[in-house]
Image (cartoon, rainbow, N blue to C red):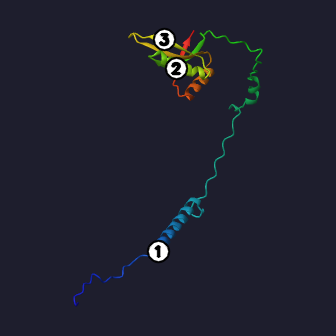
Amino acid sequence: MATRSRRGASHPKKHQQPGIWFGGGFATGVLATLLLWSAVSGDGRSEKPAAKPKPKPAASSDAPRTKFDFFTLLPEREVIVPDEETRPQVTSNAAPVSYSLQAGSFRRSEDADKRRAQILLLGLDARVDTVVNSDGNTWHRVLVGPITSRSAMAKARNILISENIETLLLKNKG
């Protein structure tokens, strides 16, 4: 094997040590920081001393002086709220409003009666309202109410939602 290839022979590669790169970067950072620090702090050797600010001219007696009247105005603007008994009663001219919850609309009256019975077992007042639309189709709507306050309406709606009964809010005027 006189002809041996030189491909197999390895030449020593020059690997640069990571510590050299780290040390160089660190030294560069320290140098840059020191230069920046000396420029910002200004040791005063090469700079002129700062000029003293000029005194402001004395305020003339003609100029109005700012006066704060907070402490005198506040007691003058105090509002005393009357008791419940002496407060005048507010009367509303608006028509009374009541609410109904539609808990379903069915073609068969038997389905509407089942839903009504389910709602009655929950302790709510329910009725079936039969409506004929313009096409001549008869629908049986299950209505809960009338309910006079929004809080009672919200409570009834939460009860129905907890039983997976979807509702539609109807507002009745008068």
**Point 52% across, 17% down: residue:** 113
| Residue at mark 3 to residue at mark 2: CA–CA distance | 15 Å
Q: Position of residue 167 (x, y in %)?
A: 52, 23
Mark 1: few/some/many CA within 10 Å (<14, 14-19, 20+): few
Disc nearer the start of the sequence (1/2): 1
85 and 80: which one is in front?
Answer: 85
Badge 2 element = helix
77 and 22: which one is in front?
Answer: 22
**Residue 122, relative to residue 94: is it above or below?**
below
User: On residue 114, which mark appears?
Assistant: 2
Q: Which residue is mark 3?
A: 130
Badge 1 element = helix
Q: Are marks 3 and 2 in contact (CB under 8 Å)?
A: no
Q: Position of residue 65 (x, y in %)?
A: 70, 32
Q: Amino acid at mark 2?
A: Lys
Q: Which residue is mark 1?
A: 20
